[in-house]
Amino acid sequence: MIGTIVSAALITFLALGAVVLGASVRVIKQFERGVVLRFGKVRSEIRGPGLALIAPFADRLHKVNMQIITMPVPAQDGITRDNVTVRVDAVVYFRVVDPLRVVVDVQDYASAIQQVALASLRSIIGKSELDDLLSNREHLNEGLELMIDSPAVGWGVHIDRVEIKDVALPETMKRSMSRQAEAERERRSRVITAEGELQASQKLALAAETMTEHPAALQLRLLQTVVEVAAEKNSTLVLPFPVELLRFLERATPPEAAPAAAATGTPAPPSIAARPQEPSVPAGPLLDTQRLDHVASSDVLADR
C-alpha cells in the first residue's frame, strides 16, 4: 500500500517536473534573438541562439527574426510634378538591429514599415518629374530610402535598400513618347545625312582640284567608270565625253599634222584658225566622211 502511494507520488513529481521543464526551456534559432518579459517588464538581457531557460509562469519569451525581410510595396497612383498620372510600385529590404526596441517601441514593425513606405512613395512621386522616374531611379531610390529609414531607426529597424520596380504610364502618354522618340531618331538621321554630304562635298572639291592639276587623272577616272559599268554585263552603255578629254587629245596630237596639210594645199578651217584651243579632229576620219558623202551623192544620181 505504501509502495503504491510512493510510486504514484513519484510519477506525479516526474510529470510536474516535465511540465515545469517544458515551460522553462525554449529553443532559439540561429537567425533569431529572444527578448524576455518577466511579469510584463522587459529584461535587458538578449537571449542568443540555442536553449534558453526562463522562469515558468513568470517569463514570456518574444522571438525576433534578424534576417533581411523583403517587403513589396503595393502600386500607388500619383501625379508627378509635371502633371503626368503614373502608377509606381517598389520593394523594401530591411532588417532588425535592436530587438528590444522592436518589441517595446512598436506593436507591428513590419506593418509600420509598410505604411511609411506607402506614404513615402506617394510623396516621392509628387516631388519628381516623369523623366526622373524613368531615367534617374538611382537618385529617387536613395531619397526614398532616407525617407523610410528616418522613422525606422527609432524602432530598431535598418533599411538596407529601396528600389522602384515599375512605372506604369497611360496609353496616351506612351503614344506621345513613341512619337517623340521617332521624331528624335528622324532628326538624328537627317543630321547624320547632312554631315555625310558635307564631308563628301569637301572630298569632291579636293578631287576636282587634283584632277585640274593633272588632266590625265580625269581620263583614268573615266576609264575606271567604264570598267565598273561593264562588269555588270549591261547591253547599253551611256558614256559622257568631256571636253577636257578632247583638249587633252588635241595637246597630245603630233605636230606633223600642220605640215601635211600645207603640203596638200588644203586650207585650214576658219574655226580652227580662230580657236586654236578647241580639239582638232584627226584627218583620217574627216577624209572618210567626205568619201562617204561622195558615194552617197553618186548613189542618189544613179537612182534618178
Image (tube, rainbow, N blue to C red):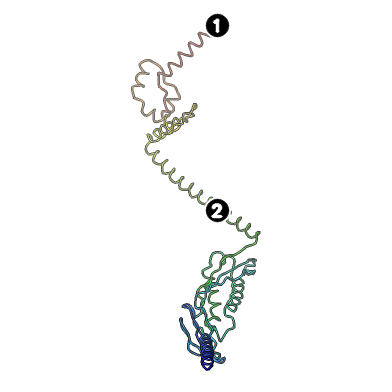
Q: Residue at x 53, y 78 (%)?
A: 149
Q: Residue at label 2?
A: 185
Q: Position of residue 100 (x, y in %)?
A: 52, 86
Q: Residue at x 40, y 17 (%)?
A: 266
Task: Out of 238 and 263, give the one closest to the viewer.
Answer: 238
Mark 2: give few (<14), some (14-19) or many (20+) Cα within 10 Å: few
Q: CA distance from mark 1 to mark 2?
A: 75 Å
Q: Position of residue 169 (x, y in %)?
A: 62, 62
Q: Residue at label 1?
A: 303
Q: Is residue 266 positioned above or below 135 on the image?
A: above
Residue type at mark 1: give it: Asp
- The N terminus - image quarter: bottom right
Task: State the SS at label 1.
Answer: helix
Q: Is residue 158 positioned above or below 220 on the image?
A: below
Q: Residue at x 41, y 44 (%)?
A: 206
Task: State the SS at label 2.
Answer: helix
Name the front one of labels 1 and 2. 2
103 left or right of 206? right
